[in-house]
Amino acid sequence: MNHNIPQHVAIVMDGNGRWAKSRLMPRPFGHKKGVESVRRAVKFCVNNGVRYLTIFAFSSENWKRPKKEVSLLMSLLMKTLKKEALELQEQGVSVQIIGNRLGFSQDLQDTFDTIEQQTKEGSRLHLSIAANYGGRWDITQACQQLAKQVKEGGLEPEAITEKVIANTITSKGVPDPDLFIRTGGEVRISNFLMWQLAYTELYFCDTLWPDFDDKAFSLALQSYADRQRRFGKTGDQLTGDSNA
Ligand code: IPE
Ligand code: IPE
Ligand code: MG
């Protein structure tokens, strides 16, 4: 199965809490288990030729969770980034944090800077970790940057093209996702990459994130490989049917 591998996979890693609950364990147990799934998914991408992976680690809406859970998630994020940095570097993974960093403690912001610096030479897989990320926030911050440039006279309003916007949102330089995966059974985007998902193939599965293993990932890639991406054209145009 190495034909038609998506270049960029974006994942909403959902279901940690329910995974723990079904085992009569507290939710943090599910989040800790979820970190193992992240490690496995990164390796899977490296081994299967996926070049870009974007994972939703913490949404701008997740601050609404109980204080205790939020602080557990913060310390898990910090610990994981510190613990995994060297291995990621060795695997050839470059890490980038996308999201509103200003919402995090100075310690965490420093940890983001450190891992980005440490892994910047990685060229096998580009891993974007979305933290305090919201798709609408991303588009809004791009609008603010561009409006400022217009106000200062460096940019004509007519020069704001889709390409300019794509280069102003936080995923600049990263191609749009080819495949979006959401685990955990919910069929929604939850304010993930609102601009970038315009033509992405969507895949939803019931598997809870801690159970998302190589087999589950392969099933998602298989579903992707079986699809015809038409981008507005007809199927016949793509298959070269003479009556098209
Ligand atoms: C996703 O799992 C992880 C984060 C949002 C950080 P959840 O914590 O949302 O798990 P469920 O949806 O409650 O099962
Ligand atoms: C989306 O999951 C965010 C992450 C996976 C980090 P949620 O579990 O927060 O999404 P909703 O609130 O159920 O839509
Ligand atoms: Mg959830």
Image (tube, rainbow, N blue to C red):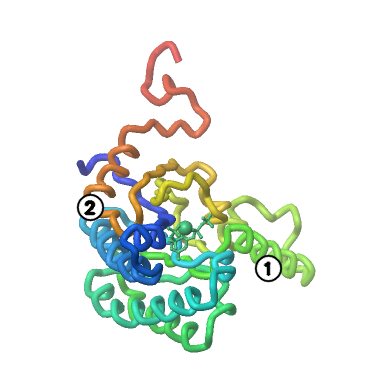
Which quadrant is the C terminus positioned in? top left
Residue annotated with mark 1: 145
- Find out whether the residues at labels 2 and 1 contact each other: C-beta distance under 8 Å: no
Q: Along the line of sight, which residue is nearer the eye, 220 or 22?
A: 22
Q: Quadrant of the N terminus?
A: top left
Q: Is residue 122 left or right of residue 199?
A: left
Residue labelled with disc 2: 214
On screen, residue 45 above or below 122: above
Q: Amino acid at mark 1?
A: Gln
Q: Residue at x 28, y 55 (%)?
A: 211
Q: Residue at x 52, y 50 (%)?
A: 189
Is there any visible trace of residue 94 in the rendered image? Answer: no
Q: Element at badge 1?
A: helix
On the question of residue 8 being in view, the answer is yes
Q: Is residue 10 above or below residue 218?
A: below
The type of residue carrying mark 2 is: Asp
Crowdedness of circle 1 by 10 Å Cα count: few (<14), some, many (20+)?
few
* In-image side of 115 versus 132 (left or right): left
Residue 139 place in picture, x, y as percent:
63, 59
Q: Residue at x 33, y 71 (%)?
A: 32
Residue 128 vs residue 23, the one in the foreground: 23
Front-lying residue, 140 or 107: 107
The single residue placed furthest to the front in the displayed view is 24
| Quarter residue 150 falls in | bottom right
x 69%, y 62%: residue: 143
